[in-house]
Amino acid sequence: MIPLHEAQEAVLAGCKPLTPVQVAYSEMTGRVLAQDVVATEDVPPFSNTAVDGYAVRASDTEQTPVELVVVDTLAAGAEPKIAVNAGEAIRIMTGAPMPAGADAVVMVEDTQRVGETHVRISRSARVHDGVRDAGSDVRAGEMVFVPGTVMNAAGVGVLASVNARTVRAFPRARVALLSTGDE
């Protein structure tokens, strides 16, 4: 019988290094990266809302309760058509881009609709409340992964968010166990 470390050395000496291959990000769970992954753009790419609510000028909510005129509704994926002026609000959904003129979002839980055209704000907003700035998750040029990173589901999500559609990764190692001896 040989010592364990000699057996390990003998086995490793017979193994060929794995050559990296291109792999779609959606197939990366459990795989090992063979390259740096650098963000090519800011994530998110534009300032957007982190909550459902009303895009407002924070200064309009200093004295609460206050009623504002609702001038538009903005869903995620839609482009703002108008700016928020003094005394106005835009109904906004999570992920929608911040409209010009607005500097805060009041959560829907802190509001009450008043008829079809107004909203009552019951809690003051501070500048940037409910807003995710462009690049607040990842900045363009930022290293997000290094070679040797074992990718989990969260990491695959990051690959998707930085638009790394394919990356170089090591193939999955194939291992076989062979039992020998009479004991």
Image (cartoon, rainbow, N blue to C red):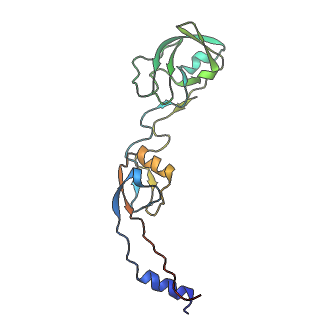
- Please report the residue visible at 41 percent of the width from the left and 46 percent of the height from the top: 160
Q: Quadrant of residue 97?
A: top left
Q: Which one is in front, 32 or 134? A: 32
**Image location of residue 19, percent across then percent down:** 34, 68
| Outermost residue to the front | 182
Which quadrant of the rendered structure holds the C terminus? bottom right
Q: Quadrant of residue 62?
A: top right
Q: Which one is in front, 68 or 149? A: 149
Q: How many marks?
A: 0
**Image location of residue 157, percent across then percent down:** 46, 47
- Please report the residue visible at 46 percent of the width from the left and 40 percent of the height from the top: 135
Task: Tell me: residue 143, above or below residue 106.
Answer: below
- Please report the residue visible at 48 percent of the width from the left and 80 percent of the height from the top: 178
| Outermost residue to the bottom | 1
Does residue 32 appear to the left or right of 110 in the view shown?
left
**Image location of residue 128, percent across then percent down:** 55, 29
Which quadrant of the rendered structure holds the N terminus? bottom right
Task: Tell me: residue 115, above or below residue 34.
Answer: above
**Image location of residue 137, percent across then percent down:** 49, 42
